[in-house]
């Protein structure tokens, strides 16, 4: 098995096109065509994680956080990023980052937090924009069903509805030139054909796949099609999630459960409101940008990390803001990545790092 096979599996789960503009997800170090000897999943890539990969004969590290985030202008080993990159290159270790694209899928990073809390009716808090596209093509009336079905293999889904399309009957014209091989009509003569205009929506990251399916199913030698970017939001992708507890609990019970299940040494939170918690908003990692949406969603609590001092005031006596720590909120991502890969490659060595890469420590 090649490294590229592993990457394709990960990108089918969390396409790279879902990452935020500022991010740097993808294959950061290494060659996708190399044979894969083993995989280690981790939250962060450090020198110790690279050493662990070498010791366990794994030549691919799959991490949540990109080790190369900003541009590297030199590799002199003057900081941990440069030293880690140098070590990975020297030992022929490939490094792959699956960051905000994994945050932006409903079964990604935030789902693991929700799973620990046994939340139900999970929905994306901030659906991602500019993901949906629409393909428009024209097919002979007799072939329209075949073409439409081919497009449905990659598109036509909107929320809980599938095989969504719009169709208009009309007349198409063309004149085939010398050397052409027309499906209908004669060389040098204008031809009129009853055609169906077919419109099908699809997620943009599947564009190459849907165009390929169209061309394979279409009878014409030259296939005409347009692709438009839609304003509609795709509710399966985006930042943060919201969900409901099976039974309402008190604020202190929620905090106690978080401390126990996430093995927390400390929890920072806004003032208690003496309200029952039944609906919770979640964002693994830094999520204070979602505070207003968490309040608007009707959630009584918002679990995230990296909340700044003044941002706690944004709770405004309307929601309990809970900061459980960046590493702590994303720690189960290591398990998530391993589970995705083990399901796809059950007979392959997929290991979870034994290194605690959390750079934050607490003194009591």
Image: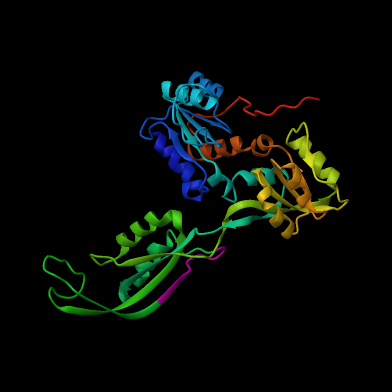
Q: Position of residue 300 (x, y in %)?
A: 79, 54
Q: Nearer the viewer, residue 197 or 25?
A: 25
Q: Quadrant of the C terminus?
A: top right
Count of marks placed on residues = 0
- Residue pictured at 15% horizontal, 66% vertical: 180
Left or right placement of residue 298 versus residue 38 in this view: right
Is 86 colored magenta in this rendering? no
- Residue pictured at 44% horizontal, 37% vertical: 27
Up the image or down, 58 lies above or below 313; here it is above
Up the image or down, 46 lies above or below 318; here it is above
Q: Nearer the viewer, residue 23 or 313?
A: 313
The coloring applied to the image is rainbow
Magenta region, mostly helix, strand or loop?
A: loop
Is 162 colored magenta in this rendering? yes
Q: From which residue to which does the magenta span run?
A: 159-167
Left or right placement of residue 247 versus residue 303 in this view: right
Q: Nearer the viewer, residue 279 or 350?
A: 279
Outermost right residue: 274
Q: Position of residue 79 (x, y in %)?
A: 53, 24
Q: Position of residue 105 (x, y in %)?
A: 56, 50
Q: Position of residue 173 (x, y in %)?
A: 24, 78
- Residue pictured at 54% horizontal, 41% vertical: 99
Q: Quadrant of the N terminus?
A: top left
């Amino acid at each position: 098995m090649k490294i590229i096979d592993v990457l394709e599996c990960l990108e089918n789960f969390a396409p790279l096109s879902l990452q935020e503009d500022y991010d740097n997800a993808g294959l950061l170090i290494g060659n996708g065509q190399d044979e894969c000897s083993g995989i280690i999943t981790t939250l962060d890539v450090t020198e110790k994680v690279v050493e662990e990969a070498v010791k366990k004969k794994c030549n691919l590290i799959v991490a949540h956080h990109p080790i190369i985030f900003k541009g590297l202008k030199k590799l002199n080993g003057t900081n941990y990023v440069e030293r880690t990159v140098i070590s990975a290159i020297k030992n022929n270790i490939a490094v792959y980052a699956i960051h905000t694209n994994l945050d932006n899928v409903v079964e990604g990073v935030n789902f693991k937090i929700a799973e620990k809390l046994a939340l139900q009716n999970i929905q994306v808090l901030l659906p991602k924009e500019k993901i949906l596209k629409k393909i428009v093509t024209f097919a002979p009336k007799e072939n329209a069903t075949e073409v439409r079905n081919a497009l449905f293999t990659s598109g036509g889904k909107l929320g809980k509805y599938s095989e969504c399309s719009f169709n208009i009957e009309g007349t198409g014209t063309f004149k085939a030139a010398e050397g052409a091989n027309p499906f209908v009509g004669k060389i040098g003569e204008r031809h009129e054909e009853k055609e169906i205009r077919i419109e099908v929506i699809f997620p943009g990251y599947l564009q190459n796949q849907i165009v390929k399916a169209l061309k394979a199913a279409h009878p014409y030698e030259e296939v005409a099609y347009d692709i438009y970017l839609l304003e509609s939001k795709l509710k399966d992708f985006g930042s943060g999630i919201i969900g409901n507890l099976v039974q309402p609990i008190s604020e202190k019970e929620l905090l106690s459960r978080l401390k126990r299940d996430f093995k927390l040494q400390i929890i920072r939170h806004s003032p208690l409101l003496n309200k029952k918690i039944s609906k919770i908003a979640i964002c693994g990692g830094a999520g204070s940008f979602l505070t207003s949406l968490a309040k608007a969603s009707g959630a009584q609590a918002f679990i995230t990390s990296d909340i700044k001092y003044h941002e706690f005031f944004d709770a405004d006596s309307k929601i309990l803001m809970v900061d459980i720590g960046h590493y702590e909120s994303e720690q189960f991502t290591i398990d998530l990545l391993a589970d995705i890969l083990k399901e796809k490659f059950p007979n392959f060595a997929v290991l979870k790092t034994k290194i605690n890469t959390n750079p934050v420590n607490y003194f009591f």
